[in-house]
Amino acid sequence: MKRITKALIPAAGFGTRFLPQTKAMPKEMLPVVDKPVIQYVVEEIVNSGIDDIVIVTGATKRAIEDHFDAPNEELVQTLMNGQKEEILAQLNHISELANFIYIRQKGPYGNGTPVLAGQSVIEDEPFAVIWGDEFILAEPPRLKQMIDVHEKYGGIVISGVKIDKKEDLRRYGIADIEPVEGNVFKVKEIIEKPDPDQAPSDIAMIGAYILPPEIFGALKRVQPGKGGEIWLVDAINLLKKEGVPLYTVVVKNSKYYDTGNKLEYLKTVVELARSHPEIGEEFNKFLKELMNKS
């Protein structure tokens, strides 16, 4: 079994749910207190033992590259003059997190297209894919848990999250599963956004994949689906039909943060602000005062 050494982050979407904010700013760069969403994703990848990260970008995404680049000389000098070496160290750390490779997306719409764009860099290795506009905080990291499952069972591995509210099942792809061991399940089928009463389980397939290199050939063979777009799930289902096993690991010790729409993004910001070491105490006082006024 080849070791997972590369991860791909699709970050080429337009972010239409956040317009006009995302007209010139990538949705992946929306701040969660003092870090952009995509930095949480990158940190998960790095903390899972992967150093090579491919980010597939599109128009108006230059800010992502700038964020993970070394700070410019003017900023460095300004921070040094202000005796803000601690902040400078944080900025240098960001640029040293990983080896970043940027690819501009080409081709039809759909979440399979950015994955296919990474073929020339990934080549014939299994690799991870994590969306750049949502994240999971877990211990050990979600991706590390997935890598451990892949090393034992091979095939395709998708991260699973238990959905607590029945009515929320209609928002996700829900897995029809059979147990393997512990929190690992074999996936028989993925039902996209089912009626909650018809959902085969309460396990949603969210945000992260470990894929074999055969996924590239499958993406080239699938026909455009809904909206004329190329969908990753269609290529995964094709490989599954051809005998590639499909697993999900329900991530332990975790909390899922959806930053893909306005309401869930604001919930994420508030929750992480409440536990932030610098502002958490004062922010909680502010929220209590606000509630008392309402």
Image: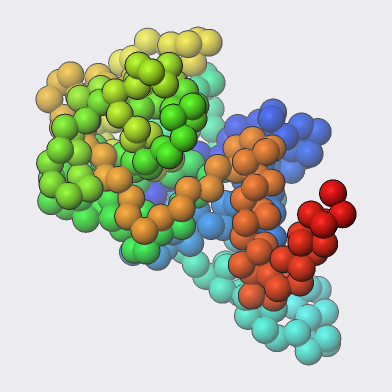
Q: Nearer the viewer, residue 55 or 47?
A: 47
Quarter of image, res 174: top left
Residue 46 vertical position relative to residue 216 in the rendered view, above or below: below
How many numbered discs?
Answer: 0
The residue at the point 13 percent across, 47 percent down is 181
Left or right of residue 67: residue 204: left
Where is residue 87? Give x, y as percent. 69, 78
Where is residue 25? Give x, y as percent. 74, 43
Residue 122 vertical position relative to residue 34 in the rendered view, above or below: above
Residue 263 visible within the image:
yes
Left or right of residue 179: residue 115: right
Residue 62 visible within the image:
no
Quarter of image, res 95: bottom right
Q: Nearer the viewer, residue 140 or 147?
A: 140
Left or right of residue 109: residue 78: right
The residue at the point 76 percent across, 68 percent down is 285
The residue at the point 56 percent across, 73 percent down is 93
Residue 152 vertical position relative to residue 169 in the rendered view, above or below: below
Where is residue 147? Give x, y as percent. 26, 53
The colour scheme applied to this rendered structure is rainbow
Quarter of image, res 221: top left
Single out the residue that lies furthest toward the right: 293
Where is residue 23? Give x, y as percent. 77, 34
Q: Nearer the viewer, residue 158 or 283?
A: 283
